Amino acid sequence: MFDAIVAGGNALIQGASRGIGLEFARQCLAEPRIGHVVATCRSPQDATGLADLAAGHPGRMTVLPLDSTDEASIIAAAAAAARIAPRLHLVVNCAGVLHDAARGMKPEKRLADVRPESLARAFAVNAIGPLLVARHFEPLLAHPQRAVFASLSARVGSIEDNRLGGWYAYRASKAAQNMYTRTLAVEWARSRRNVICVALHPGTTDTDLSRPFQANVPAGKLFGVDYAVAQMLGVIDRLQSADSGQFFAWDGERIPW
């Protein structure tokens, strides 16, 4: 794994406090070809798992605050990252929201359940956040070496694949994220030809995001975070320039938009 990443290449994991993001940081640190890992999350002071990981890899990992719904926070994190890792070779956006009990946010079963505030929150975190990360971290991708910009999406964001309905906020915000990813890939094909820009579906993974909805997951289809991340890193490593602007599942399957 990581054969395609330049030796000493640097990685940014956005949304690394727990779950998939934390595991991305862990597996990147376990790979000797990765030089430095910049891990971001909204509240580093509360991210004990991330702090322990950083403590175990002194000099190879930096934790920065970044709230993807706050552009000033993204700008500050990008400036700090530039001083630590002025060239990035892998950027993975992991932050996402499906439900939030504190805000009364949960997946909608029917049209009557739709709430404007939940729609706005889902779009801010799932769609707008990764795009603003791209905007402000783009200068760190401005180099001649291969780089990958990947945003974790979800199969439910595929319009063509939608056969069950419901989950209005999550589906629509992920569809918007997919469109942003595709549009960004088109632009970078002209201006950042070294960057491969893709959306990734991790499968149903055993995290806080999926936990309330795992009862109906078929046997063998609920993945541990270690397996899901290893699979996605394998997909990332195999990407070619022609794959930019596409949507891939954890097993390398191309998902229709």
Image (cartoon, helix red, strand yellow):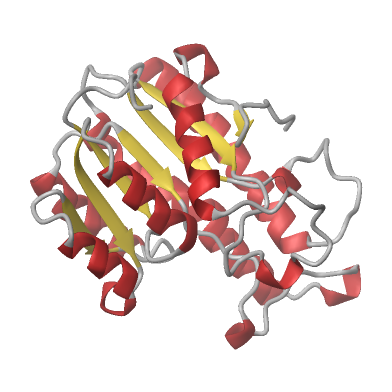
Q: Residue at x 59, y 59 (%)?
A: 123
Q: Residue at x 10, y 56 (%)?
A: 58
Left or right of 90 on screen, residue 257? right
Displayed quadrant of residue 257 = top right
Displayed quadrant of residue 196 = top left
Q: Residue at x 27, y 37 (%)?
A: 31
Left or right of 176 on screen, residue 5? left
Farthest residue to the front: give it.
Answer: 220
Residue 136 visible? The answer is no
Q: Position of residue 26 (x, y in %)?
A: 33, 51
In the image, 152 versus 5, the foreground residue is 5
In the image, 37 versus 182, the foreground residue is 37
Vertical placement of residue 255 versus 146, above or below: below
Displayed quadrant of residue 250 = top right
Q: Position of residue 101 (x, y in %)?
A: 63, 84
Vertical placement of residue 163 versus 56, above or below: above
